[in-house]
Image: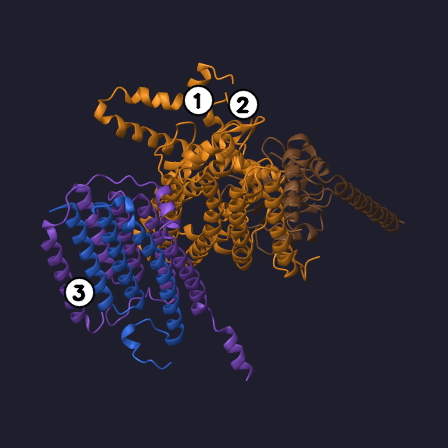
Amino acid sequence: MLGEGILKGMAETAKNFFGSYFSAERLTTVEYPEQRIAPYEAARVFPFLVFDGSDWEAGMRCVACQICEKECPPKCIFIEKSKDKKPDALGKQQFYPARFDIDISVCMSCQICVEVCPFEAIKMDTEYELSTDNRFGGLLLDRRQLAKSNQYYHQIHPAEADGVDARLAAEKAKADAKTKITAEAKTAAIAGEGA
Amino acid sequence: MSQTPFFENLDQIFVLLQHWLVSFLPTSWQPAAGVLLSVAAIVCLFPALFALTTVFERKGLARIQNRLGPNRVGPFGIFQPIADAIKSLTKEDIVPLSADAAVHFLAPLLLVITVFMGFAVLPMGRNMVLVDLDAGLLFYFAMGASSELAVFMAGWSSRNKYSLLGAMRAVAQMISYEVPLLLSSVAVVMITGSLSLTKIVEAQNQYTWGLPHWYIFTPWGFAGFVMYAIATTAETNRSPFDLPEGESELVAGYHTEYSGFKFALFFLGEYVAMFSISGLGTTLFLGGWSAPLSFLTWIPSWIWFFSKLMLSIFVFIWMRGTLPRLRQDQLMNFAWKFVLPMCLVNLLVAALWRFMGDGWLRWVFCSAILIAAYAGMGLGEMRRQRLGPRSYRYAE
Amino acid sequence: MTPLTGYLLVAALLFSIGLAGALTRRNAILVLIGIELMLNAANLNLIAFWRYGPHPEALTGMMFAIFSIAVAAAEAAVGLGLVIQIHRHAKTTDLDQMNRMKG
Amino acid sequence: MSIVFYLLAAITVAGGLAAMLLKNTVHCALALTVAFAGLALLFLNLDAQFAGFAQILIYIGAVAILVVFAILLTRASETPKDGVFSKTWLAGLAVAAAVFAVLGWAVMQSVRVLPHETAVPEVTVQQIGVALVGRYVLPLEIVAVLLTAALIGAVIVAMHEKVGHEKEEGK
């Protein structure tokens, strides 16, 4: 019958109207500044630099290899390699970034830097409240602002961070074993030489 | 009836207030001052109501869509309109370079003036009517018809294709739906035998077994009210007939090129037109300021008028939240091929009702004619697939 | 000057303006506007005579005016329909260019 | 003769003049509405409420809108280059001036016989309605037929010749 559909529709919206006052689960709105949804584990916003231990400068995993700088599609990463070297997590002497800037007003959150990093040094953050009243300096993050601890990484991406830690541990073990073997070989060689 | 003096005074409080205020002036000024005072009351009241309605509309639409709606400014977002007003008043008033400046300036003024003129003849309570014109209904429709010109002026003077298209759509739509609007009101005039809106209300302010003699409770009145409601929705450019300002097609229709205060005037004009046309519908079909049940007559008449008015505003909002926008050809077909014939049948039924005398026979007879016409025309439309359910080729 | 004279003079002036417009404008629509003005001037005469006539209760002048308004509405609808059709046919509404009866 | 009358007469005549003199056709139409509104107010000044409101409803609400639509549909809003007045404008103006002279002379000649201020006639809408379906029922019916004929006629005249075109293409 003509007009039946209109009445059906009106009934449906009336149900919504009154229902929204009585059942809270109908309302999907999150009132943002007061309420916020915890970010999903897979959420990605902008990259940050991971450091181990408590000293951000000493524990920085980044070795300033500049792969991410070259791969970055919008060219938002700027790295200046250090002159001197310092031991990294594996105990190997490595360069470190004297300067590491990311302009997050340019970054497009593509995550390519994370994928190309051979040292698991750069990861994606879930922090999204980055608005600032200074559009040049405020959005250009330096290495102090970018450095975040491995604990923080575990907090925001637990499963991923566990995998990373396991891999790093395995690598470290392998490297240790290798140094051990080379050391043994060396001592053996020395011994052989001596013999 | 429990018509105690207190409630009688409460009923007439605004009339008494006006008399008291005017009594301070010399006698020769009193009539003019009284009129000025009433005009000032109307000009203050309805914009205030408009401000409240905008926030209620947004909240109502939000609830219909299971959202919360504005709730930031003040408790429950009640001060939102104040924020909006400050925003639109402080905005720059932009007039396009190629616009016809004089006409561009006059259009919003003309719209608001004609819209407010309509209130002059609406009885908002017992003895609460600005001028009780003998040809009140005609005056109302004359003012309503003049607002179309303002819409055209706005659209044409902007020199913007969207404005012009919106104005053309609006004017075509308003003219098409003015015919059923007038015809459905003529049925009421035929039964009452007067064009005076106060007389129309008085004719409905009677009770049998505690039930009122509202025209909506008669077969022709019910059909007339439905047709009137459809026509008013189109006349005020409300959803589902909001083609003139369809955001997804025409930016904002005829007021695309208006900003700041002039845009606010258009916005105000639209809402106040909605109030006034709802007020007219209330007066014609819902008994105006009369109480719905005979034992409730002690409640002041203006409370009844405004609660009926707000109820119809709620229905407007409810429809806006439910129905999708029509297509232009559907709109015109609906007006000329369904609503207009129904109104003509309704006129015939009203005449029959008038001359058949009391008794159950006229109820049966009149209802039967209307239902037959509705079913016949409705089924015919459905069969022609003009108003039937749409099939989507690519979706689903 | 009696009140009626004033109304009659206004009506005569309006009629002459309408006539002048209808005779001098080139656009067909403006010629129609001129004719509307002339009709309106006549209506003003009718109402003025009704108001100041000897038998206003007979409503003759008023009725004439009302019927005249109705007829003028019909005239406008048909006239403008014709103008639109002519424009479609001849691609112009300029009356100076419409000097042939053959389509 | 009150000040109100002079004011309304001035508005009406100015609107009429503007409607006939302005270059832009849409401005002409808008000026025409001013003239219509002035006339409606003159009707109200003459205590003809019903006729005044009917004037606003029909002329401003319908005829003016029709004119405006016709202007837009015929692209008449673009001002022509070779002037808005026809070649024979002088003759037209002369005829109009002559008509006004004759009318004015006739009106001024009859001042002596014209009645002075009369009592305000008490006419209700009900009386008009009764007269319409009583004494004037035949004109009413004829107007009804005329309006129907005009409605159908206007639709047919303005309708696209779609059927004809299709037939032509078919051949």
Residue furthest top as drawn: B5
Considering depth in this image, is C40 or A65 the residue closer to the camera? C40
From the top left corner, tell me how far across and down residue C91 is, in percent.
37, 74
- Chain identifier of the blue chain: C
From the top left corner, tell me how far across and down residue A67 is, in percent.
65, 54
Q: Which residue is mark 3?
A: D96
User: How far is mark 2 from mark 1, CA to CA?
Assistant: 12 Å
From the top left corner, tell me how far across and down residue A130 is, in percent.
56, 40
**Residue type highlighted by circle 2:** Leu
Q: Quadrant of the C terminus of chain C?
A: bottom left
The subunit carrying tag 1 is: B
Q: Secondary structure at mark 3?
A: helix
Same subunit, tags 2 and 1: yes
User: How far is mark 2 from mark 3, CA to CA?
Assistant: 67 Å
**Residue type highlighted by circle 1:** Asp
Q: Which residue is mark 2?
A: B296
Find residue B11 and name its label. 1
The color chain D is rendered in: purple
**Residue type highlighted by circle 3:** Ala
Find residue D87 and name its label. none
Considering depth in this image, is A48 or C14 the residue closer to the camera? C14
- Chain identifier of the brown chain: A
User: Does B62 sit left or right of A192 as displayed?
Assistant: left
- Chain identifier of the orange chain: B
